[in-house]
């Protein structure tokens, strides 16, 4: 292609087109040859001079053509060199991305191994290390592995009466465990093809760590797309790794749903960043939309909280297009992909009502309606009028969302998500926190407000200060762009040109979305893992953005692009060096720490249950512990930590009465009615001292029952009454006849007490 352009330029220079004026001059010269003899004589006298001049012009033209050829060769050499350097940069940047993804996977694998000595501990210890929800999810992977066939494993998941002994549930409908099904199927296929295979647990954890290698590559590419430099991408990755305490917890919560889901949402955001570029070709748009669709689908399939993340993203996309900073046609496609992804996952999950009643699934059609009305409305150049319009459209889309959501929930009779709204109302003190579900969430550390030490840690590692400056600058640019957009006199339906961010709608999207993610993280601490990765990308962009440095140089009258690129790379490199100097010693220290899993009491409990209880035995206990019981022993449960079902939440509240002030008969009747065989009591819960008053589990049960909890001031809690009934979990230790009549202690160690219900004895008495 370059040689063709050079030949074309040479042809144009050697054979220039003549203009009409030059043609007239040539005709005049031809007519002059027919003049009088005097003129002919004069012309004859001038012939030698003319011939000499023509000779000189030929020499000059030859010299010019030689100079043109030299300049063209130099230009061709320059273009070839430029193409080579760009290709080299692309190869180096891509290689660095792959290397960084691989080494990050190895890094978190090493941290996990060093923390637990995972490769050397017993199988039961490995399983116990998957705490709470993580153990529950991994148990389905183990169940599929142990199943005689894939079809039998799927049948057992669809018709499960072990997770909730008092009813049969569809695991694939209730939980997001398709990743466990896929990995178990993959393991079975590999084991059929290869004689020597890795242990099932290593296929599982290595798959998650590899996925997080892809995760950091997606952040790398996102920063590269925003800044145009892989130096900036390296800085974004460095921010993410050195702020690991606040960017991820994958090395100790491997099976959690977010460990699978977060890589997919950031892959999707990376593709959206590319898709929103104005210069992208149509074929590239189609391929990118397919990638966005796949990532969106896998994200929803992996995490029950994906619907809330999608709601924030949909609101950010809606805000971007409403302000006129992104093309309406592209935003419509992305919103449509979100809706289709949720519906497809809903079908795969046997019409999961929680997905059908998701707020985002009501927001998307509401946004389509409002955007259609907005497109047809008369545009104004009055800024005040436009502000009122944006606010009006915002209120309208929220009202429509609320109406659609109420109608859908009424039609499908959905109230399983009410605990979320109760929690939010209680969190912001808009209602009295006397509800069990609201208190459980409110007192859980993962659902607290973002703590101050988060800002201290991220500031000490340079992330938060740089991010803050960047996001404020971007929001100012968004504001300026909106004012410029509204000031234009002529607008087209899908036109977003003529403003500061006209060539970079992806920056407007990132700025608005980061604000939404930040608000969510400030409200719910657990959601900081959604905000901090984007913080890393935007902070790196703030340092290595050519737009920033170009603007600074223009203030000093410098317009050289070479200076801009040079300072851009130097500044990025300096921050990388400083960050590495500050944080690398801590990373090396973490890698040098060698620990070992040690929980002998839980190991002893699990081994006793496996040896001394029948396979069909039903266990009741804390949600967190029972997940481990199912994983390690395969016994039946009465409750578990997946808390998204109304009937289960109510059942958990009843079962937890053994931590309240209840008589032994009341506790026995509750557990006997649902078929409990054994109750596991934990002293760490019964005598909880670490939690704040009012947030200990016995306190929560007392408040729910209307009882005054331990240490409470009666004057501050007038609606709670004092009762004399002793706390069950404490009083049962005295083994009085009143308690031994219903419960028999069969196991005890420093942490746990296991009681068997005396069902046969009490049944005989009832018959008599």
Image (cartoon, rainbow, N blue to C red):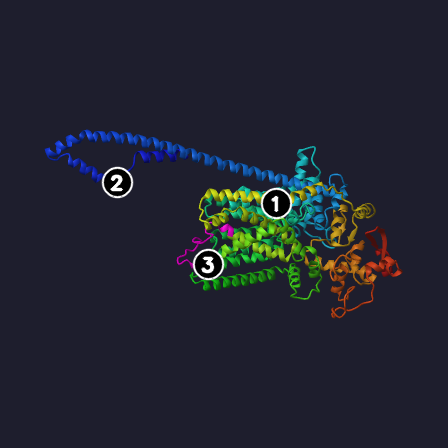
Disc 3: CA contacts within 10 A as few (<14), some (14-19) or many (>=20): some
Residue labelled with disc 1: 579
Residue labelled with disc 2: 19
**Is residue 503 highlighted in magenta?**
yes
- Is there CB contact under 8 Å for labels 1 and 3? no
For the point 43% across and 53% down, which residue is it? 497
For the point 23% across and 31% down, which residue is it? 53
| Residue in the foreground of this view, choosing between 329 and 713 | 713
Instruction: Examine the residues drawn in magenta and state their main secondary structure.
Output: loop
Query: Would residue 149 be seen by someone viewing this image from the given angle?
Result: no
Where does residue 653 sit, x and y in percent of width and height?
Answer: 74, 60
User: Where is 192 relative to 624, above or below?
Assistant: above
Query: Would residue 301 be seen by someone viewing this image from the given angle?
Result: yes
Q: Which residues are magenta?
A: 485-507
- Is there CB contact under 8 Å for labels 2 and 3? no
Label 2 or label 3, whichever comes before in sequence order: 2
Where does residue 254 sit, x and y in percent of width and height?
Answer: 68, 46
- As drawn, the residue found furthest toward the right would be 737
User: Where is 566 relative to 661, above or below?
Assistant: above
- Helix, strand or loop at disc 3? helix
Quadrant location, the C terminus: bottom right
Q: Is 345 positioned to the left or the right of 506 in the image?
A: right
**Is residue 134 highlighted in magenta?**
no
Label 1 or label 3, whichever comes before in sequence order: 3
Residue labelled with disc 3: 483
Disc 1: CA contacts within 10 A as few (<14), some (14-19) or many (>=20): some
Where does residue 518 sit, x and y in percent of width and height?
Answer: 59, 55
Q: Is 15 positioned to the left or the right of 470 in the image?
A: left
């Amino acid at each position: 292609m370059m040689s063709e352009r050079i030949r074309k330029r040479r042809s144009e220079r050697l054979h220039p087109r003549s203009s009409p004026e030059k043609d007239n001059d040539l005709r005049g010269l031809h007519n002059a040859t027919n003049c009088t003899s005097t003129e002919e004589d004069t012309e004859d006298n001038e012939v030698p001079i003319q011939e000499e001049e023509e000779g000189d012009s030929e020499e000059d033209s030859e010299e010019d053509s030689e100079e043109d050829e030299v300049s063209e060769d130099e230009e061709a050499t320059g273009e070839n060199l430029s193409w080579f350097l760009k290709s080299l940069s692309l190869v180096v940047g891509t290689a660095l991305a792959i290397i960084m993804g691989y080494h990050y996977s190895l890094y978190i694998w090493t941290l996990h191994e060093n923390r637990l000595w995972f490769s050397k501990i017993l199988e039961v210890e490995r399983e116990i290390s998957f705490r709470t929800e993580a153990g529950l999810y991994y148990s389905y992977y183990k169940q599929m592995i142990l199943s005689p066939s894939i079809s039998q494993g799927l049948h057992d998941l669809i018709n499960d009466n072990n997770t909730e002994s008092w009813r049969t549930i569809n695991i694939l409908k209730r939980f997001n465990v398709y990743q466990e099904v896929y990995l178990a199927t993959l393991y079975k296929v590999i084991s059929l093809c290869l004689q020597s295979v890795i242990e099932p647990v290593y296929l599982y954890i290595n798959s998650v760590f590899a996925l997080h290698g892809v995760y950091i590559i997606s952040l790398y590419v996102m920063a590269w797309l925003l800044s145009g430099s892989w130096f900036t991408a390296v800085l974004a990755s460095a921010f993410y790794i050195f702020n690991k305490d606040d960017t991820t917890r994958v090395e100790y919560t491997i099976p959690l749903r977010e460990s699978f889901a977060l890589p997919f949402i950031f892959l999707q955001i990376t593709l959206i960043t590319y898709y929103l570029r104005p210069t992208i070709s149509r074929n590239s748009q189609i391929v990118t939309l397919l990638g966005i669709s796949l990532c969106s689908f896998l994200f929803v399939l992996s995490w029950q909280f994906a619907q809330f993340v999608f709601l924030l993203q949909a609101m950010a996309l809606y805000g971007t297009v409403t302000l006129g900073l992104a093309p309406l046609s592209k935003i419509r496609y992305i919103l449509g992909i979100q809706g289709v992804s949720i519906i497809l996952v809903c079908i795969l999950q046997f019409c999961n009502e929680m997905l059908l009643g998701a707020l985002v699934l009501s927001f998307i059609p509401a946004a389509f309606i409002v955007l259609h009305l907005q497109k047809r409305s008369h545009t104004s150049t009055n800024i005040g009028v436009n502000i009122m319009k944006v606010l009006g459209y915002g209120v309208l889309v929220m009202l429509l969302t609320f109406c659609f959501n109420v109608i859908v929930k009424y039609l499908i009779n959905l109230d399983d998500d009410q605990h979320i709204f109760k929690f939010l109302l209680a969190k912001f003190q808009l209602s009295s926190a006397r509800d069990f579900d609201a208190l459980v969430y409110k007192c859980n550390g993962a659902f607290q407000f973002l703590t101050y030490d988060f800002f201290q840690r991220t500031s000490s590692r340079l992330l938060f200060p740089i991010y803050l400056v960047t996001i404020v600058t971007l929001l100012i640019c968004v504001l300026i762009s909106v004012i410029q957009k509204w000031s234009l006199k002529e607008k087209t339906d899908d036109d977003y040109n003529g403003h500061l961010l006209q060539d970079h709608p992806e920056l407007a999207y990132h700025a608005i979305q980061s604000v939404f993610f930040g608000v969510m993280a400030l409200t719910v601490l657990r959601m900081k893992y959604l905000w901090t990765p984007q913080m890393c990308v935007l902070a790196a962009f703030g340092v290595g953005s050519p737009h920033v440095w170009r603007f600074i140089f223009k203030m000093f009258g410098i317009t050289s692009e070479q200076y801009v690129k040079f300072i851009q790379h130097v500044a990025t490199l300096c921050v990388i060096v400083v960050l590495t100097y500050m944080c690398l010693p801590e990373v090396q220290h973490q890698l040098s720490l060698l620990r070992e899993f040690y929980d002998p009491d839980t190991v002893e409990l699990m081994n006793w249950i496996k040896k001394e209880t029948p396979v069909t035995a039903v266990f009741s206990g804390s949600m967190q512990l029972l997940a481990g019981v199912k994983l390690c022993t395969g016994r039946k449960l009465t409750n578990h930590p997946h808390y998204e079902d109304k009937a289960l939440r109510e059942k958990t509240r009843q079962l937890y009465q053994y931590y309240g002030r209840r008589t032994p008969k009341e506790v026995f009747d509750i557990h006997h009615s649902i078929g409990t065989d054994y109750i596991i009591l934990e002293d760490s819960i019964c005598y909880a001292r670490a939690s704040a008053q009012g947030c200990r589990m016995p306190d929560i049960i007392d408040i729910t029952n209307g009882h005054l909890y331990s240490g409470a001031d009666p004057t501050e809690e007038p609606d709670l009454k004092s009762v004399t009934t002793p706390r069950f979990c404490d009083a049962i230790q005295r083994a009085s006849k009143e308690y031994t009549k219903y419960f028999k202690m069969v196991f005890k160690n420093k942490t746990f007490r296991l009681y068997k219900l005396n069902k046969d004895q009490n049944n005989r008495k009832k018959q008599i």
